[in-house]
Image: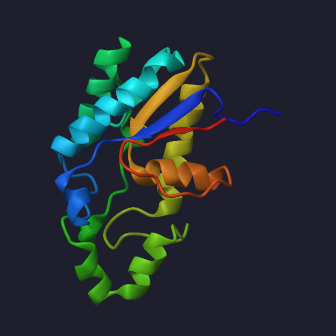
């Protein structure tokens, strides 16, 4: 039996200033920084020989910017899918991790261990995010061609947890789902 998303690879967007300062960005339109642009170029070089036929991305600015850099190298036009956006971090949006930890260490610990029952105050639960991401990946899988999905750390991490492959996902990492 083959993996359910075997023809899909996922890539996290390049670094943002929010990543560098450990600040929750959620659905904010945060751009990639200079390091992120270099990471996106490196990602493009990694992706180039892999024969992707489709390029999907989250419409959030940081993912879209990364996808456009990759697209320029591999000759594909990015296809936006809103189901691939990062978790809605609700009341934690634009806050430093350290501030949240000082205020509610148990909630931050649940966030860090990707507890499926964790929900951001005023935002989205990991369970809901997993459902929407898996629906998007299922639709992407309907076409047999290999696809690259440029998105966000928790989108990838929750997918990997679903596939029993829990791992941290650094900026601009390329992760195969086979």
Q: Is residue 12 above or below residue 24?
A: above
| Residue drawn 21% across the image and 58% down it | 18
| Residue drawn 38% across the image and 15% down it | 74
Q: Quadrant of the C terminus?
A: top right
Q: For this view, does 100 lie left or right of residue 165?
A: left
Q: How many marks?
A: 0
Q: Quadrant of residue 2?
A: top right
**Residue 5: x percent and y percent?**
64, 34
**Residue 4: x percent and y percent?**
69, 36
Q: Is residue 52 above or below residue 119?
A: above
Report the front residue among 9 and 78: 9
| Residue drawn 26% across the image and 79% down it | 98
Q: For this view, does 169 lie left or right of residue 64?
A: right
**Residue 109: x percent and y percent?**
45, 79
The extreme top residue here reads 75
| Residue drawn 28% across the image and 65% down it | 90
Q: For this view, does 119 lie left or right of residue 78?
A: right
Q: For this view, does 112 lie left or right of residue 100?
A: right
**Residue 40: x percent and y percent?**
30, 34
Report the front residue among 35 and 23: 35
């Amino acid at each position: 039996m083959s993996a359910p998303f075997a023809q899909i690879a996922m890539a996290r967007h390049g670094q943002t200033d929010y990543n560098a300062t450990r600040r929750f960005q959620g659905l904010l339109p945060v751009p990639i920084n200079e390091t992120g642009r270099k990471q996106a170029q490196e990602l493009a070089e990694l992706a180039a020989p892999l024969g992707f036929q489709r390029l999907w991305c989250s419409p959030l600015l940081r993912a879209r910017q990364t996808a456009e850099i990759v697209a320029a190298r591999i000759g594909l036009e990015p296809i936006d899918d809103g189901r691939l956006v990062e978790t809605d971090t609700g009341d934690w949006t634009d806050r430093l991790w350290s501030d949240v930890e000082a205020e509610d260490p148990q909630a931050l610990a649940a966030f860090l261990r990707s507890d499926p029952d964790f929900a951001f105050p005023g935002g989205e639960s990991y369970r809901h995010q997993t459902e929407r991401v898996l629906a998007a990946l299922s639709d992407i899988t309907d076409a047999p061609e290999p696809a690259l999905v440029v998105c966000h750390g928790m989108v990838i991490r929750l997918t990997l947890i679903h596939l029993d492959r829990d791992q941290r996902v650094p900026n601009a990492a390329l992760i195969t789902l086979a």
